[in-house]
Image (cartoon, rainbow, N blue to C red):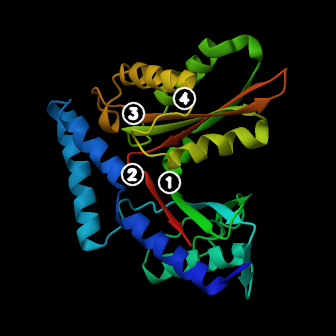
Amino acid sequence: MRNIKSKTITEIVESLCVDTNFCLPCDVLSSLKQRILCEEGIAKDILKEIVENADIARSEKLPLCQDTGTANFFVKLGKDVYIEDGNIYDAINKGISLGYKNNYLRKSIVCDPLDRKNTQDNTPANIYIDIISGDKIEISFLAKGGGSENASALKMLVPSYSWDGVKRFILDVVDNARNACPPLIVGVGIGGDFSSVGLLAKKTLLREIGSKNISPIYEEKEKELLEDINKLNIGPMGLHGKTTVLAVFIETKPTHIASLPVAVSIQCHSCRKQTVIL
C-alpha cells in the first residue's frame, strides 16, 4: 500500500488548473500550424491569430481564453493507494479553488442552475474516477468552455438508424456548432445508455490529435467524419474554409439491443487538457 497525502493532490491540481489554462497542448498547436498551410485568405489569417494567441498566453502567463471552463477531472486511482488526511474529491476541489482564485482565472460555476449564484472559486468540478491496479494515480484535467459545451448534443437513436443515421446526427450537430469557435475537436460516444454515452464522448477529447483508434473499423469512421465535416466549409471561427475540425474521436460501449445512444461533445480550438501521474 502506498500513502499519498491529500495535500499533494491539491498542489498538483492547483498547478494543473494554471498550466492547462495558459499553455495549449503540443498536439493541438502542431495541428493548427499544419492547417495554416492548407488555408488561404481570412481562414489562414484566423489560424495564424489563434497560434499567436497561444504563444502570447504561454509567454505572458495569461489564459488562452477568457472562459476558463468547467473543471473536468478524469482520475485513474490505483487500488493500492491510500489517501492520507482526506479524500480525493475534497483534495481536487480544494486545488481548483486555489488555482482559480490565486491566479485570477474566471470563475464560471453557479451553485444552482436557476438562481445562478456564483460559487466564487469554480468548484465543484466534474470528477470521474476509475479504479485500476497498482499504486499510482493518473489525473487528467480538461477545461471545457461553456460555448462548446452548449453546442454538444445527445440523442437516443434506435438500431435501425445504423451508421448512416449516426453519421447524419453527428454532421447536424457540428453544422449547428458554428458559434463554438472552430476549428473544433469532436468527441463521439456511441453505445452505453443515456447517462454514460455523454461521458464517453467527452472522455475522447483527452486523446492526442493524430492518434489512431484501437479499432480499425472506427479508425476508418473517424477519417470519414473528419473528411465529411471539413467539406461543410464552416471554417475557422465559422467564416468558411477547409478547416472546420482538427480531429474526430470515437469511443464505443456495449448497449441494449433496443438502443443506439449517440453523444457528440464539441470542443473549441482551445482544447485545454493535461495529464499527470503521481
On the image, which quarter does residue 158 sit in?
top right
The residue identified by callout 4 is 173
Secondary structure of residue under mark 2:
loop
The residue identified by callout 1 is 145
Residue 245: which disc? 3
What amino acid does circle 2 point to? Ser
Verify CB contact (< 8 Å) between mark 1 and mark 2. Answer: yes
Looking at the picture, tell me which residue is in the foreground, 19 or 209: 209
**Sequence-wise first label, 2 or 4:** 4
What amino acid does circle 3 point to? Val
- Residue at 66% from the left image edge and 69% from the top image edge: 124
What amino acid does circle 1 point to? Gly
Picture coordinates of residue 192 (x, y %)?
Answer: 76, 35
Residue 132: which disc? none
Verify CB contact (< 8 Å) between mark 2 and mark 3. Answer: no
Farthest bottom residue in view: 85
The residue identified by callout 2 is 270
**Sequence-wise first label, 3 or 4:** 4
Verify CB contact (< 8 Å) between mark 4 and mark 1. Answer: no
What amino acid does circle 4 point to? Val
Q: Nearer the viewer, mark 1 or mark 2?
A: 2
Q: Is residue 63 left or right of residue 167?
A: left
Q: CA distance from mark 3 to mark 1?
A: 17 Å
**Sequence-wise first label, 3 or 1:** 1
- Residue at 42% from the left image edge and 19% from the top image edge: 228
Q: CA distance from mark 3 to mark 4?
A: 13 Å
Q: CA distance from mark 1 to mark 2?
A: 9 Å
Count the marks: how many?
Answer: 4
Q: Is residue 7 left or right of residue 85?
A: left
